[in-house]
Image (tube, grey):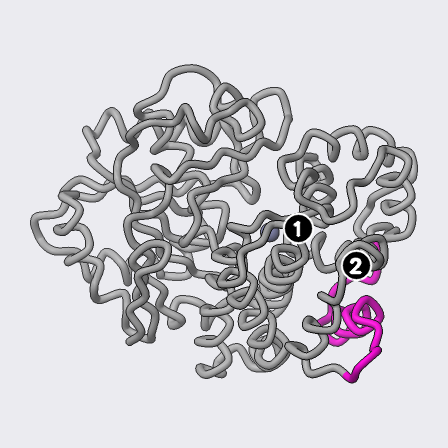
Amino acid sequence: MATITYPNLMEIDFGAIKVLGDALKRNGITRPLICTDKGIVAAGIFDTVRGVLPNDVEPTLFDGTPANPTEVAVRQALKLYRENDCDGIVAIGGGSSMDLGKGVALLSTHDGPINDWSAVNGGRDKIGGCPPIIAMPTTSGTGSEVGGGAVIITEDGQKVVIGSPNLLPKMAICDPELTLGLPKHLTAATGMDAMAHCIEAYCTHVVNPPLAAIGLDGLERVVTYLKRAVDDGQDREARWHMMMAASEGAMAFGKGLGAVHSMSHAIGADEEMRLHHGTLNAVILPTVLRFNANDVGDKYARLRRAMGLEEGADIATWIEGYNATLGLPNGLGEMGVTEAMFHDLSIHCMTDACHFANPRTPTVPEYEQMFADAL
Ligand SMILES: [Zn+2]
């Protein structure tokens, strides 16, 4: 088992789930709120986790996490947290369950609407102590297990980012066994989210060579193993490396993200469309790579090396082909996005936290053009 201590304590390997009891004890948690979704319960993963809990631990289950976590769901979970006098959170699932868990941790000690604590409203400096979170990812994409950030749809329909070192999980238990049953389309979509994190973080202007190197390493793993994990979900080696790549992607985005994410957050805020964050990123990534091409110095040369591409190869074109081999859509139009939506989406992008880190700062008309290009 690999034990990693940056940025939090992380245990990654098949069988890592067995350290959960120890993790709870170490963090003084005896009455955890388990934040997850109905799919995880139906897949038997909740039962597997319950099976490794010590006898003196009394879990409370919240399985109502929506596909994109909402403030409404956070408040439902918070009610359970308070009614059962919980003293910590175990988040089991994809990014949604982990982000929801962070929302509950925040609101258990902070009053008012989530937007008051959002990154753009200075939340990072205002957020104080929160109960401990243990994160157990069941997908390989978001990397939320090694990050102190969460994306939550507020009651007025905004997709806001909250982030604080106090929301960083005390421990990430990364057991690739929990990802073996992940269906092909979700393996592909979440894996491309990890790729988007590695590439976008690497390309920001923030100077942080260790994080840049982690992003390049994660990218190499995605390119080497994602197709294998999609083709054969039981490929244990591929699943291990994808789990590592997902955590690396999130470590790297300590350098910030960019327009791929501001655009996917804008579209993803539409609760009726319910579009998958990773699928959106996969489809948008080539367009933003072309938009940024003249503002990234020699970074694309290093991306090509990490990806094993020939010198001068067009990364955007390569990703379009890769999306196709993974069975992902080839444009936003295929996903139901229409031209009539471009203007409002572009306005939304301008206030997204990720907008500010993109190496070339887009204007509203430039966002509209990128939505058109990605259609
Ligand atoms: Zn993402």
Residues shaded magenta? 310-331
- Residue 120 lies, in percent from the top left, at 58, 27
For disc 2, the marked residue is 289
On the image, the x and y values in percent for residue 38 come to 44, 48
For residue 19, above or below residue 262: below
Tell me which residue sits at (28%, 30%) in the image.
129
Q: Which type of secondary structure does the marked residue at label 1 adopt? A: loop
Q: Residue at (32%, 61%) from the top-left corner?
A: 10
Q: Which mark is residue 205?
A: 1
Whether 364 is drawn above or below 231: the answer is above
In the rendered structure, which amino acid carries the disc numbered 1?
His
Residue 274 visible in rendering:
no
Q: Residues within 10 Å of mark 2 (few under 14, many from 20)?
A: many
Between 63 and 342, which is closer to the camera in this rendering?
342
Q: Tag 2 or tag 1, which sits nearer the N-term?
A: 1
Mark 1 vs mark 2, foreground winner is 1
